[in-house]
């Protein structure tokens, strides 16, 4: 936080340089403040006691550790898809898909939107999308053993 105040003081001194400098200064100050807040937020999250979140994380990874549920999530990543279409695509019964979707919806991994008699499922949460995409990239990377 001290870094931010020093930057603010530097920017204040620069204001006397004219309107263009002021605009640039305001933009730099905003970027500095934004970056400082992001860093502070990350540090706060990293320094927080993780023990309170371990169980929730383990439950989430356990939920996604099931191959059928993971296939469902991957199927819902691209675009909203009906329960029936998921079942056809994965060659599984709609009742089994519905069972897994209930668990995934309860964990906020997927969401469902009713349109008439059909429910369209999708992965709306950007955290889940990013995590799954990053993990797919990770396993696709060449690795040295």
Image: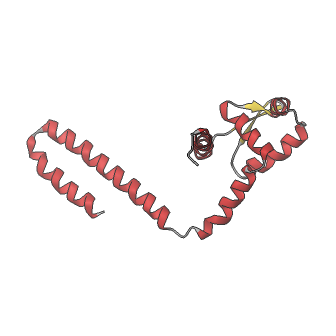
Q: Quadrant of residue 110?
A: top right
Residue at 39% in and 56% down: 39
Residue that extends furthest to the front in the rendered view of this protein = 145
Q: Residue at x 13, y 46 (%)?
A: 15
Task: Identify the colour scheme used.
Answer: secondary structure
Residue 69 in percent (x, y) is at: 77, 45
Name the residue at 60% across, 46% down: 131
Relative to 34, is 78 on the left or the right? right
For the residue pair 89 and 118, the one nearer the viewer reads as 89
How many labels, in total?
0
* Residue 59 figure quarter: bottom right
Q: Is residue 80 above or below residue 9?
A: above
Where is residue 24, by image quadrant? top left
Q: Considering the image in quadrants, where does the N terminus appear?
A: bottom left
Residue in front for this viewpoint, 141 or 97: 141
Residue 74 % position (x, y):
70, 37
Please state the horizontal and vertical placement of residue 47, each as a whole percent of the image. Answer: 47, 67
8 in relation to 142, above or below: below
């Amino acid at each position: 936080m001290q870094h931010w105040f020093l930057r603010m003081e530097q920017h204040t001194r620069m204001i006397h340089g004219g309107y263009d400098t002021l605009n640039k200064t305001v933009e730099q100050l905003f970027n500095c403040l934004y970056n400082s807040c992001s860093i502070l937020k990350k540090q706060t999250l990293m320094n927080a006691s993780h023990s309170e979140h371990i169980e929730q994380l383990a439950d989430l990874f356990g939920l996604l550790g099931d191959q059928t549920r993971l296939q469902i999530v991957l199927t819902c990543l691209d675009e909203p898809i009906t329960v029936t279409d998921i079942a056809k695509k994965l060659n599984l019964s709609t009742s089994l898909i519905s069972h897994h979707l209930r668990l995934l919806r309860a964990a906020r991994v997927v969401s469902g939107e009713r349109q008439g008699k059909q429910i369209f499922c999708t992965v709306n949460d950007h955290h889940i999308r990013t995590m799954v995409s990053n993990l797919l990239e990770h396993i696709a990377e060449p690795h040295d053993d």
